Amino acid sequence: MAQFTHGISALDVTPASALSAPVWLLGRRFQDVAATDFEAYKRAFESILWFTYRRDFVPMTPYEFSSDAGWGCMLRSAQMLLGQALQRQLNGRLSLRTAVELESGGTLSEIDVKLLMWFADAPDSACRYSIHHMVQMGMHYDKLPGEWYGPTTAAQVLRDLVNQYRRDCGETLAMYVPQEGVVYRDDVTQLCVSHLEKEAVEMKEMEMQDGPAFFDPLLHPPAVDECREWSTALLILIPLRLGLDQLNERYVPALEKTVYVPAECGDYWWQEGTLGVLCGHAAKPITFAGPS
């Protein structure tokens, strides 16, 4: 959002030497950015949504906060990851036009406008992922407006909002935050496949005219075809602690490899008061600017 508002690009401070080697950006490889792939890389980089602190938005009654500066960093980084996932799902990897394209007469599509509206900071229902709605959901986790969020709580708040709108509005994106960093196949199946079997199970129960008067679902569990095609996309956020006071360097190689995954939406991290989203790397990690 800030990229569209202010036309800010972190590429202005990226060393040219870092762009001469192959560069990976959210699962996409650019062989030689400095020589031949710069424009494609620049467009890919600038199409990533960037959310930063805002001020003068509608106050969060009854607390009267009209800015999230100093406490909303984790929520903004969570918005970046969700924005990337929604952008891919709705329009493909590189759907949003960059600020330069808009200045030269380009226009946003109806889907792009809807996507940006979802993250506008207002209590309106159309702004479903605004900081107002995130803070409101955060109160279920004993977080008040103005309080700093940890990675796990921010992920849980985002998950609750995404899954709520999926149920209420029929959206085709679900979100999963596994406990203890372990992804369970049954949980994924329940989110993406199992609900498709509900109607078939109910019909089967109605047809059991000659069966027992009491139907025990534990004795007759519904069959779930794990090979069945998903009916929804899935965003998985795994909160992990990769060190004590700072990032343990032993985790860096594994963390860098995540950007090779085509479905990667970024890794958000916090260290010593600094927070950002890792979205790609070349010779050294390139961190997509955080809220501050």
Image (tube, rainbow, N blue to C red):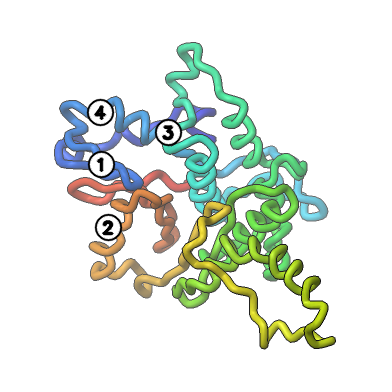
Which residue is under mark 3? 94
CA gap, disc 2 and disc 1: 12 Å
Of callouts 3 and 2, which one flags the residue occurring earlier in the amino acid sequence? 3
Which residue is under mark 2? 257
Residue 67 to residue 96: above or below:
below
| Labels 3 and 2 touching (C-beta < 8 A) | no
CA gap, disc 4 and disc 1: 12 Å
CA gap, disc 3 and disc 2: 21 Å
Q: Nearer the viewer, residue 51 or 280?
A: 280
The amino acid pointed to by label 3 is Leu
- Element assignment for label 4: helix
Which residue is under mark 4? 38
CA gap, disc 4 and disc 2: 22 Å
Residue 4 position, x and y percent, is: 51, 28
Residue 284 to residue 214: above or below:
above
The amino acid pointed to by label 4 is Phe
Q: Nearer the viewer, residue 88 or 66?
A: 88
- Element assignment for label 2: helix
The amino acid pointed to by label 2 is Lys
- Element assignment for label 3: loop
| Labels 3 and 4 touching (C-beta < 8 A) | no
Residue at 35%, 49% (x, y): give it: 262
Residue at 73%, 57% (x, y): give it: 136
The amino acid pointed to by label 1 is Arg
Residue 219 position, x and y percent, is: 67, 87
Residue 115 position, x and y percent, is: 60, 37
CA gap, disc 3 and disc 4: 15 Å
Give me the disc on residue 29: 1
Residue at 34%, 68% (x, y): give it: 246
